[in-house]
Each structure stands twice: as structure tokens, then as C-alpha cells.
Image: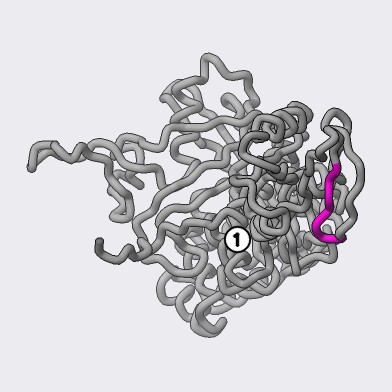
Amino acid sequence: MSKISPLSGFPELLPAQRAVEREVIASLSDTFELHGFANIETRVVEPIDRLAKGGEVDKEIYVLQRIAAEPDAKAELGLHFDLTVPFARYVLEHAGHLEFPFRRFQVQPAWRGERPQEGRYRQFTQADVDIVGRDELPFHHDVEVMAVMVDALGRLPIPRVSFQFNNRKLIQGFYRGLGIADVTDAIRVIDKLDKLPAEEVARMLVERVGTTPEQAQRCLELATIRVADSSLVERVRALGVTDELLDQGLEELAAVVEGCRAVAGDRVDVEANLRIARGLDYYTGTVVEIFMEGYERLKSVGGGGRYDALASDGRTTYPGVGVSFGVSRTLIPLITDGVLSGSRPVPSVALVALNTEDERGTSTAVAGALRTRGIACEVAPSPAKFGKQIRFAERRGIPFVWFVQADGTHQVKDIRSGEQVDADPATWAPPEVDLRPRISSTATSTNTSTPSELEENQ
């Protein structure tokens, strides 16, 4: 048989690593549900024309086609490359059965045929949370959705994250107040500040967008504003530009920043960063990008914003606001670097030792009694010497070994401390922290486990 080589861009996790991912997803889901968001799962394929952007098919879309299809058959289905496109279709298709505003979260894989690199994969998992209205969606939902994701990420044992907010209305109103005609093109040029010197960006504003040098300078001054509270209003007004849309954008941005700061805790930063431009050409109000401390090389690990027309059937428009967190984009680099690890590769908290093969039924009955009370366990594979059975448990990371005594009584041993005590299968329970595999993190001072424990550690 030929040697099997990894398939680039399609990461696979070992069991202990997968335990980390599962606990993170469970924590995210738990937080979203605490805020009243319902979980949905959409199909993985969509018609190619729905996945097309502006009528042009993205070359990174993976198509789905029967292997026995005619050679000249045209593919009609493609794998979704994010969760927004299928969600918009879901809203249109099921609108008659949904109660609006509709609050949904979704954690699913997506596929994108791009060049694989750290943090960017061909198959990856995302976690999205959105609120969608019918014809209208009051602004307070912007604050709510962003605060939900702040709360969710603040409970995770990952490095410190920073939520950086901007607002399309603020930028559009400011540019309009300056007299700049092509707002969208100006936004695209300002977006290059991350890659080009300010002087070069100013030159492009003049030559490409048609601004005056003075207008270009004002745009750059706006882009340098970065504050963590509502003082951003005074900072922007000090630039001397007035516009009704600018006033509305300032009010909204200040409200989002203050609302998110109220739930941020001590491991999440929240600020207004008026340099954030990515997405402003298609978002209509709030926009956010999420960055992770020490992993700035990944660029953003999440983002989102306000769509005033997430979906439309020609009669009804469904505005929405949402934010997405890159589960794979964030976790795989952290796991690779050893920042996150799982405490054990198996869910079993106890190994029931086997005295002899003839007594397997007795050990199986003990395991059954433990499982009825939610204690994950397994029976030893063979009646080897007890030392070998204990080493088997150690290799699998199982903390307890259960022994059935010759007189029918029971004992359980914590193989980490060596302590062995009498036990009853009908009443014994391990410490809460051992019930599930834990996430060990060098990014925090605590080890975390189940969603409830993640919450308690905040």
C-alpha cells in the first residue's frame, strides 16, 4: 500500500485535540442559548448561482457533481464557503414558519478552495450568531448581538481578544460632509492603511478617488481615532465635519462600544477603531473585527456587522445583524502551538478492571451502573495483571480504576494520587472537574472543562 499523505487544507484533529474543539463549541453554544438564540443547521450545498458574488462565480467554490455525470455536464451545486449565504436562503425559504425577529446561532463546517496557510483552511468550522427582522430591525439588536459574542468569547480559555468596531454610517456621513462623492472607493483605499504608508494612501485618495489633499488628510485623521469609550464622539466632532448621517453613525457606534464594554469582563478589549474598513462597502451600519493577542499574524479571527438587506424576496426585506467567530482559524494554531490541549483523549473517567474473562459480566454490570448516572467509563480489554491495566488507563488519560473485590465489594483508585477507597457503583461519583476532558490552557491561569465550568472561571 502506498504511503498516505495529509491532504493540505483539510485539518484533522487527534482525539485530545478534538476534545478541545468540542468543549469550545459546547461553551459557545451554551452562551448563545443563554441569550435565547435557537440553533439551526443548514444544508452544505447551495445552487451555484446563489453562491455567486454579484453574478460572478467565485473560483474558490467547490462544486458538487456525480462522478458518473456526463463529461460535458455543468455543475449546479456547490459547497457553501460561509454560513451567511445559506442562512439568507434559509430565512427566505422558511420565513412563513419563523417568528421575527429571528435569533439564530449556527456552528458548522464550510469549504473554500484557497491556498492553505496558517489560520486559513479549505475546510473550516465557523460559529455565527445573528438576529434577523422582517422589513425592519431596531438598532438595539446591533448592541445585543455584538454583546453576545463578547460574552461568548470572554468565557473561552483563549488568549485575550479585542473587538474593534466601526460604523458605515459614520464613515459615509463623514466623507459626505467632506464633499467626497465616491464613498465606497474611498473606503477601499483607506483599507490599505494596514499595508501602505499613510502618505501613499493619501496620494491614492487624491489620484484615484479625486479628493483634494485637504480632504485626504481629514480622512487619515479620522482613521487614526481609536478609543475604548464614548469619547470617540468628541474626537470625531473635533475634526469639524458635520452631517446628519455622521451624527447617527456616531450615536450608534458609541452605543455598541458602551454596551459591549458592560459585558466584556477582564479578558476582552472593546474599542472603536475608525481604521477598520474591511466590510464597510457591504455592511450598512455596525461593523466589527475580532483580533487575538499574540496571534495578530492571523489577522481577524472573527467579524461581522449590520446588513439592512440580508435577504429579500422582492416583496419583503429581511435586515440582519450578526457576527462570526472562526473556530478552526482560532483553535488550530493554538493547539499546534501548545497553548490549548485536552486533558485526555477519551471521555472515560473510570476504567473498570477485569479480574478474569469469566467475570467480564460483573465488570460490565459495574460499568452499566456508572453510566446510568452519567459517568463515562469502559471495561478493561483483557484480564491482564492489575499493574498493566492501570498503565493502560494511564496511557489513555483515565484518572480512576475500579476494582471488584473477591468478596463482592468494590474499590476505586485515583491513579494520579494513588489513593484507593471503598466505593459503591450506585453512589460513587468522581470530582466534577474529572467528569469530562478538560481544556488545559497556557493563556489563562485556570484549566477549564465543561461549559458551566468555563463560565465559573470568569
Question: Quick check: is 413 in the magenta stretch?
Answer: yes
- Amino acid at dot 1: Thr
> Could one spot residue 81 in this view of the protein?
yes
Could one spot residue 142 in this view of the protein? no
**Residue most extreme to the left:** 71
Query: Badge 1: few (under 14), some or many (20 or more) residues near its Cα, within 10 Å?
Result: many
Closer to the camera in the image, 61 or 231: 61
Instruction: Work out whether residue 439 or residue 77 is closer to the camera in this orientation and state it.
Output: 439
- Residue in front for this viewpoint, 290 or 127: 127
- Mark 1 lies on a secondary structure that is helix
Residue visible at 84% across and 66% down?
445
Q: Residue at x 91, y 42 (%)?
A: 422
The residue beneath circle 1 is 330
Q: In the rendered structure, does residue 104 fall within the stretch colored magenta?
A: no
Percent from the top left, x then y, of residue 279?
53, 55
Residue at 77 percent across and 53 percent down: it is 399
Write down the quadrant of residue 113 in the picture. Answer: bottom left
Q: Position of residue 223 (x, y in %)?
A: 64, 70
Which image quarter is the N terminus in? bottom left
Query: Residue at the spot x=57%, y=33% of the render?
Result: 319
Segment colored magenta: 411-417
Q: Is residue 352 left or right of residue 206?
A: right
| Residue 409, x across and y down, in percent | 86, 35
On the rendered structure, is 289 left or right of 437?
left
